[in-house]
Image (spheres, coloured by chain):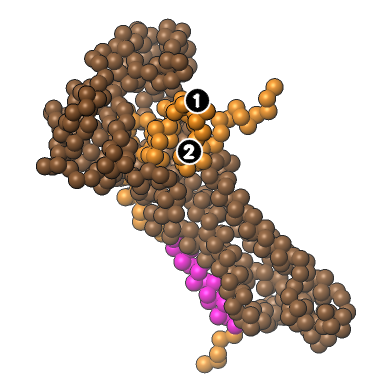
Chain colours: A orange, B brown
């Protein structure tokens, strides 16, 4: 048997990586779809049943736990001049109005 | 066919040349893959969270009415319920009782809620998955709460909310309305806010206006605002995401700059020798193009695979820590894959193509100089 040329070996490696990626992108979402749909449906049911408003993603401060319910100046809500001292505050984009130039 | 054989020979040569400097090139691929990994992880997590938020929060109340006092959230008196209910288009008004309880021993803040029609009795609670994990040492199977009066109240956890609902219920504790009022000292006839049901979506704007006219001290929050908030949080252009992406972008720029500004003495000598042996400029450029493609394609595939495994198979540990912040409750990110092929394609063109092209610039400069001058440095 002829020894493999470097380009063959590299082609093989690339094909293996591409195959692994294709497997992950095409097969895994299908396999996990059922569990994912069940999870989403269960969470959506609880949201509708209890009238929940927010995701429990950033539980460290009141205004990050309930992002949609916090007042509009939440970074300063503890006392006037209080800066946002929780790391998750940095996840939030500034209010849309701040992006627009002042008239 | 001849062209193909020729390119294959170039690739063989390039791979052997890369192999000669394997330490340096392996480090380069690893660092490059790390940049792709970071960008792709953010991309995967952001898209999955946005999709999840939109699906899960679709059933949230159409309208939440808060009362404001001196610019801050205040409790709503019962009389507001009748006022809102009288507005045409409103089918149901549910007063909500909820708040936050800080457990000093656990160092965590929990969301306590008293849903209407709580199925269990006095002294009983239902806990979310994160609460069961973090609440330290229940006494005699009871969760002890310090009430507003300063005494302790024990609650028996009779049910745990399903693990599958953790994304919305991780820190949730449910109890009866009477227990809620006892713990927090909220007087009868007052609620945290109102959940308003407006079946006809087109009437929502009018209903909102009417509520604000009838009750000027209230702040109505529409469901679409709520969904917009989450769309904004997981936006490419905002907050933490932009910080992560800027870091990755900067790292990539440094790579590209390093490649674009010059070749090592060894690489220059190699080009000089090749030119002296009869390679023309186009041959040298072909070789360098293959070199750029080899490195960037390998790094792209490795980075993307690692990102997928990180976000969808390993619970996005990197982001879970960032989301946790100073909180004791770490959210479990069990994300359902949601991938946009356009984003993958953009990532490919933004990482592979520029790198492959940028490697050509210094090679072209060296290849167009006299071989003797190149070899002498």
In the image, is B179 to the left or to the right of A58?
Answer: left
Q: Quadrant of residue B125?
A: top left
Check disc 2 and report its element: helix, strand or loop: loop
Q: Quadrant of residue B284?
A: bottom right
Of all residues shown, which one is farthest toward the bottom? Answer: A1
Residue drawn 51% across the image and 41% down it: A90
The disc placed on residue A85 is 2
- Residue A100 point in image, percent of width and height: 65, 29
In the image, is B250 to the left or to the right of B52?
Answer: right
Check disc 1 and report its element: helix, strand or loop: loop
- Residue B229 point in image, percent of width and height: 48, 32
Above or below for A99 versus B327:
above
- Residue B305 point in image, percent of width and height: 48, 62
Above or below for B342 versus B168:
below
Q: Which residues are magenta?
A: A6-26
- Residue A5 point in image, percent of width and height: 59, 85
Above or below for B28 versus A53:
below
The disc placed on residue B338 is none
Of all residues shown, which one is farthest toward the left? Answer: B140
Residue drawn 29% across the image and 11% down it: B78
Residue pointed to by mark 1: A80
Quarter of the image for the C terminus of chain A: give it: top right
């Amino acid at each position: 048997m002829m020894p493999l040329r470097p380009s063959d070996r590299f082609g093989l490696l690339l094909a293996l990586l591409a195959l692994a990626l294709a497997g992950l992108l095409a097969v895994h979402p299908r396999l996990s779809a059922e569990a994912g749909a069940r999870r989403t449906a269960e969470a959506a049911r609880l949201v509708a049943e209890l009238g929940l408003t927010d995701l429990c993603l950033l539980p460290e401060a009141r205004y990050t736990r309930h992002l949609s319910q916090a007042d509009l100046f939440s970074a300063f809500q503890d006392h006037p001049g209080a800066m946002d001292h929780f790391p998750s505050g940095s996840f939030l984009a500034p209010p849309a109005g701040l992006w627009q130039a002042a008239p | 066919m001849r062209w193909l054989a020729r390119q294959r020979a170039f690739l063989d040569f390039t791979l052997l040349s890369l192999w000669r400097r394997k330490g340096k090139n392996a480090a380069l691929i690893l660092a490059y893959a790390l940049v792709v990994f970071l960008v792709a992880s953010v991309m995967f997590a952001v898209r999955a969270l946005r999709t999840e938020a939109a699906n899960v929060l679709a059933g949230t109340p159409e309208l939440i009415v808060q009362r404001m006092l001196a610019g801050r959230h205040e409790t709503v008196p019962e009389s507001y319920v009748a006022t809102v209910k009288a507005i045409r288009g409103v089918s149901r008004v549910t007063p909500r009782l909820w708040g936050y309880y800080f457990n000093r021993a656990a160092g965590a803040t929990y969301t306590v809620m008293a849903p209407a029609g709580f199925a269990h009795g006095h002294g009983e609670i239902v806990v979310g998955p994160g609460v069961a994990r973090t609440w330290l040492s229940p006494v005699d199977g009871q969760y002890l709460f310090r009430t507003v009066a300063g005494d302790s109240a024990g609650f028996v956890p009779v049910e745990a909310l399903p693990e599958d609902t953790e994304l919305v219920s991780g820190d949730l504790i449910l109890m009866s309305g009477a227990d809620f009022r006892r713990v927090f000292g909220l007087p009868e006839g007052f609620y945290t806010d109102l959940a308003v049901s407006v079946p006809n979506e087109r009437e929502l704007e009018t209903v909102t206006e009417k509520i604000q006219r009838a009750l000027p001290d209230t702040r109505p929050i529409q469901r679409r605002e709520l969904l917009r908030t989450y769309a904004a949080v997981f936006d490419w252009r905002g907050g933490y995401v932009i910080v992560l992406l800027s870091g990755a972008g900067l790292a990539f720029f440094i790579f590209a700059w390093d490649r674009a500004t010059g070749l090592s003495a060894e690489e220059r000598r190699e080009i000089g020798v090749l030119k002296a042996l009869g390679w023309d400029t186009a041959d040298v450029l072909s070789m360098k193009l293959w070199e750029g493609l080899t490195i960037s394609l390998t790094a792209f595939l490795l980075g993307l695979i690692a990102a997928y495994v990180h976000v969808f198979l390993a619970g996005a540990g990197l982001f879970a820590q960032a989301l946790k912040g100073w909180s004791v409750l770490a959210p479990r990110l069990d994300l359902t894959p949601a991938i946009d092929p356009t984003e993958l394609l953009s990532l490919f063109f933004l990482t592979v193509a520029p790198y492959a092209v940028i490697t050509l610039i210094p090679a072209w400069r060296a290849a167009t100089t006299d071989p003797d001058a190149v070899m002498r440095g």
